[in-house]
Image (cartoon, grey):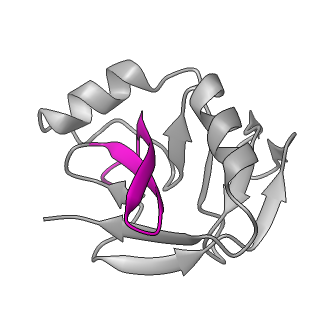
């Protein structure tokens, strides 16, 4: 589950929480979601480079047809904190960014078709 309010990603096996990671979601112009929504991982790439944004997005796991994915980023902690305190001008183009270690763990743990629930207040 991606919680847009607290900028955390929670990974569950049934009801048991397995992982909790800080994340950074989409900016005001490119929100990750505009309402709570359920998706599934349908494509995974350990190494991936976005042609649209010329950006490296390793450990990418795509969960929407318009290109939203969880992936590695070097700008998670500060962006996550600023979004939690209400600064929405920063963020991704809708993706859910994770630190390299967290993205790698999530990538290894998540099989194809893993549900991705994006939640907000």
What is the x, y in percent for residue 87? 19, 35
Q: Quadrant of residue 86?
A: top left
Whether residue 102 is visible to the viewer of this picture, yes or no, is yes
What is the x, y in percent for residue 74? 58, 20
What is the x, y in percent for residue 100? 64, 25
Q: Is residue 91 rendered magenta in the image?
A: no
The quarter of the rendered structure image containing the C terminus is bottom left
Q: Quadrant of residue 56?
A: top right
Q: Is residue 4 above or below residue 46?
A: below
Q: Is residue 52 above or below residue 86?
A: below
Residue displayed at 68% across by 57% down: 110
Whether residue 23 is visible to the viewer of this picture, yes or no, is no
What is the x, y in percent for residue 4? 28, 53
Image side of residue 112 versus residue 100, left or right: right
Image side of residue 12 versus residue 29, left or right: right
The magenta region covers 7-29
The quarter of the rendered structure image containing the N terminus is bottom left
Residue displayed at 27% across by 77% down: 35
Residue displayed at 35% across by 27% down: 79
Q: Nearer the viewer, residue 93 or 7?
A: 7
Q: Is residue 23 rendered magenta in the image?
A: yes
Image side of residue 23 versus residue 59, left or right: left
Q: How many marks?
A: 0
């Amino acid at each position: 589950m991606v919680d847009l309010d607290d900028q955390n990603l929670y990974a569950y096996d049934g009801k048991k929480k397995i992982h909790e990671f800080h994340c950074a979601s989409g900016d005001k112009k490119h929100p990750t979601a505009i309402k709570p929504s359920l998706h599934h991982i349908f494509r995974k790439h350990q190494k991936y480079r976005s042609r649209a944004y010329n950006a490296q997005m390793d450990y990418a796991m795509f969960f929407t047809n318009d290109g939203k994915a969880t992936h590695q980023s070097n700008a998670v902690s500060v962006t996550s904190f600023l979004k939690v305190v209400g600064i929405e001008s920063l963020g991704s183009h809708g993706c859910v960014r994770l630190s390299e270690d967290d993205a790698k763990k999530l990538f290894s743990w998540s099989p194809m078709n893993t549900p991705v629930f994006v939640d907000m207040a």
